[in-house]
Image (spheres, grey):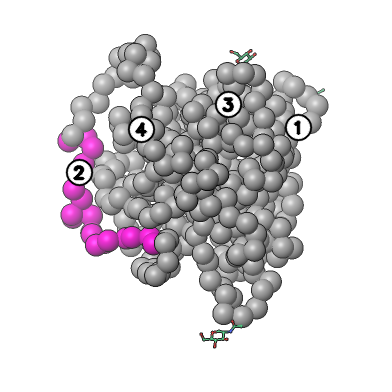
Amino acid sequence: MRNRQRKSSALNFDAGYRSSVSFVLWSLVGVGLIVCFLSFKHHEDSGQNRVYFSHLPSTRELEEIEEERFRLPPPHKVNPRAVKRRGPRKQPKVIEDYLDESSAVHALFFPDQRTAVDPTKRGNDSMYFYPGRVWLDTDGKPIQAHGGGIMYDHKTARFYWYGENKDGPTYQAHSKGAYRVDIIGVSCYSSKDLWSWTHEGIVLPGEPRNVTHDLHKSKVLERPKVIYNDRTGKYVMWMHVDDANYTKASVGVAVSNSPTGPFTYLYSFRPHGFESRDMTIFKDEDGTAYLFYSSCDNTELHVSPLTMDYLHITAAMKRILIRRHREAPAIFKLQGTYYMITSGCSGWAPNSALAHAADSIMGPWGHWETLVLEATGFSD
Ligand SMILES: *[C@@H]1O[C@H](CO)[C@@H](O)[C@H](O)[C@H]1NC(C)=O
Ligand SMILES: *[C@@H]1O[C@H](CO)[C@@H](O)[C@H](O)[C@H]1NC(C)=O
Ligand SMILES: *[C@@H]1O[C@H](CO)[C@@H](O)[C@H](O)[C@H]1NC(C)=O
């Protein structure tokens, strides 16, 4: 992710508690969508929060195939000055509204904990998930796993949710800098049912002292994702690694013998020499894994198969969703079709997610459906 406006606007309030809650919210909204997709259940609610998955079409009905619509410019033709001249894209009004404490929208983003989704509570609420509420772990603390990814582990027959722990103060490193929370580390939670999550601790901590280290607390670690490698028996984590000004734009790799860590950080690099910002990894049924990353100033995504040990990328790479300005990719496969959900580039602020579908994971990826999370909006 890289959006200075997001950071400078989204975190423009003083108490660390509130920012923690907001981050928890984003996580739970995102995971809520994942859960919805896993169950593929059309959820109707008489309340304000409704998720629409209207008419689920087959891939035959793909409306748009990007390569037909967009001619692909060679990468060096992109002129950053031209991008700058065009100026920042206009932000929807809701982006400002949700920070305004007096607005009706605000309460949806910053709820108190009285209505929290609480796995320890008995009664009719049991096993229900409510978008727009704080989600507690089995210790009763808000889940801290932002920009997260969920892996099912066959060995332990559990789900593991990895994400950024943002339970620290929000500040600006310098007057023009992005609002930030120092790297605390990657949190891990385990679950048997995707609803009740037990904190397994910080499985990859930030580095408190060594300022040259990629994970020094003054830097940026976002979107940790873990997959298991059946050949090596290792759990491999990929993440977005950046400096505080988002100029490094690299992927980082870490590895562990256990799903609950500790993970050993290996290195970072720019895949194929390109910027890599929001990213994810996806392990296919045949054991091949892929890296998806937003690149070229977030104008497009790239997809590349990983090596057999999942520790590097291969030379193959395809550019997808060109000039679509999408980020926060999440991939899943259902009945032989690949699906990808992406957000627009409005930072933490809400925007409508898009779903894309493909018969081949390397593309072409078509536009499949717009997902609208009414009232709360949906973002990264
Ligand atoms: C659960 O719902 C039923 C029916 O709506 C209601 O009668 C009962 O009081 C509820 N129980 C709790 C613990 O909320
Ligand atoms: C600090 O981190 C760098 C980069 O990871 C590493 O090369 C160096 O050995 C570290 N220094 C110490 C004192 O650990
Ligand atoms: C970020 O940018 C600011 C102002 O341009 C500069 O003072 C600072 O040193 C930069 N920090 C890093 C980590 O590059």
Q: Is mark 2 on a helix, strand or loop?
A: strand
Q: Percent from the top left, x then y, of residue 296?
A: 40, 24
Q: How far apart are marks 4 and 2 (CA)?
A: 16 Å
Q: How far apart are marks 1 and 3 (CA)?
A: 20 Å
The question of residue 190 being in magenta is answered with no
Q: Which residues are the magenta region? A: 50-68
Q: Residues within 10 Å of mark 4 (few under 14, many from 20)?
A: some
What residue is rendered at 42% in x and 61% in y?
Answer: 49
Location of ligand 3 given as a quarter of the image: top right
Q: Residue 64 carries which label?
A: 2
Q: What element carries label 1?
A: loop
Residue type at tag 4: His
Residue type at tag 2: Glu
Residue type at tag 1: Glu
Q: Which is more N-terminal, label 3 or label 2?
A: 2
Q: In which quarter of the image is residue 379?
A: top left
Reading the image, the residue beneath label 3 is: 178
What residue is rendered at 61% in x and 80% in y?
Answer: 123
Q: Residues within 10 Å of mark 1 (few under 14, many from 20)?
A: some
